[in-house]
Amino acid sequence: MMESVDSESKHSYIGSFLQPPDKLKSAFADLRPKSVINCPPNNQALVAALKTLQEKIHRLEIERIQAENDLNCLSREAAQYRRALEQESNEKNIVHQELMEEKKDVSVPLRVAQSRCSLLEKQLDYMRNMMLKAELEKKLVLEQQTHLQKEDDQNQMELCAKLEKLEVLEKQCWTLISTQKTAEEKIKHLEQKLLEEQHQRKLIQDKAAQLQTGLEMNRILLSSLSPEKEVKKKSRKKKVLKNNSTMKRTQTSFQGGMLPFVAGKVSIVSL
């Protein structure tokens, strides 16, 4: 139906919205401003109206093309924005997964440490209860001892037995006290060892930074050699390669935590 309307308007004098009529093409093919003077007034008005209409159609075509370009630009920007949002969501998902993995990695030793702490607390509570029981039993034995001293010689055997029991309890008490002291000394030793290891790690990191700085300075010095020293450079090439391989092995040992360290000494690599 639209094609029939367009075809009818195409062959009319007015034409369609998008295409001027065919009948006017031949009439206005060689139209010039000077030909308007020779046309009758009615034809001049018609030509002016047609020209105005064609200018409006041309402007509408330009606006339509501009709107299509704007629409394409908006669609491209929307696609870019969609891709940026997808990339951002993917990055957020990756960061979330990494955080979850880090939490998992941290939660395992944390649970182990918590279980150890709870076990130590239980052991300390048990030792405390044992000491309290020992003290109570000691008081009870002392009370019984004062009471037995007033009794007849027939209760002397029972008194001796309870005294022996008291000695056993005292030995157990001293054993528990020594065990507690040993545990405290071990804890202090472990804390001191941890501090020493942290200090050694800091020294190793500082040494690695110094070696990296030395390697960078050597690289800069080697790159700044003049062409006149090429012969000398070639003669020392094997030695430099050997030193570089030694430095790489030393750096690899630094990265792997395999450093030959002696207390009070610093190992220096020849550059």
Image (cartoon, rainbow, N blue to C red):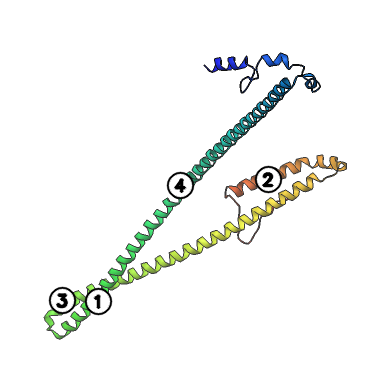
Q: CA gap, disc 3 to disc 1?
A: 15 Å
Residue at the (23%, 78%) spot, across then down:
139
Residue at image point 59% right, 32% down: 71
Cα distance between the residues tagged 1 and 4: 56 Å
Amino acid type at circle 2 is: Thr
Residue furthest to the bottom in view is: 150
**Callout 4 amino acid:** Met
> Which of 7 and 208 lies nearest the eye of the viewer?
7
* Amino acid type, mark 1: Lys
- Whether residue 80 is visible to the viewer of this picture, yes or no, is yes
* Position of 104 relative to 86 (above/below): below
The local secondary structure at tag 4 comes to helix
Q: Say whether marks 3 and 1 touch (CB < 8 Å).
A: no
Indicate which disc, 1 or 4, sits on the residue closer to the N terminus. 4
SS at badge 1: helix
- In this rendering, is residue 67 above or below 153? above
Mark 3, residue position: 158
Q: Nearer the viewer, mark 3 or mark 1?
A: 1
- Tag on residue 100? 4
Marks 2 and 3, how far apart at CA: 80 Å
Query: Residue 149 at what x, y percent from top left?
Result: 17, 84
What crowding class fits label 3: few (fewer than 14 Cα within 10 Å), some (14-19), or many (20 or more)? some
Residue named by callout 2: 246
Mark 4 packing: few (<14 Cα in 10 Å), some, or many (20+)?
A: few
Residue 89 position within the rendered picture, expressed as x and y whole percent measured from the top left: 51, 41
Element on which disc 3 rests? helix
Question: Pointer 4 and pointer 3: residues touching (CB < 8 Å)?
Answer: no
Q: Residue 229, which numbered label?
A: none
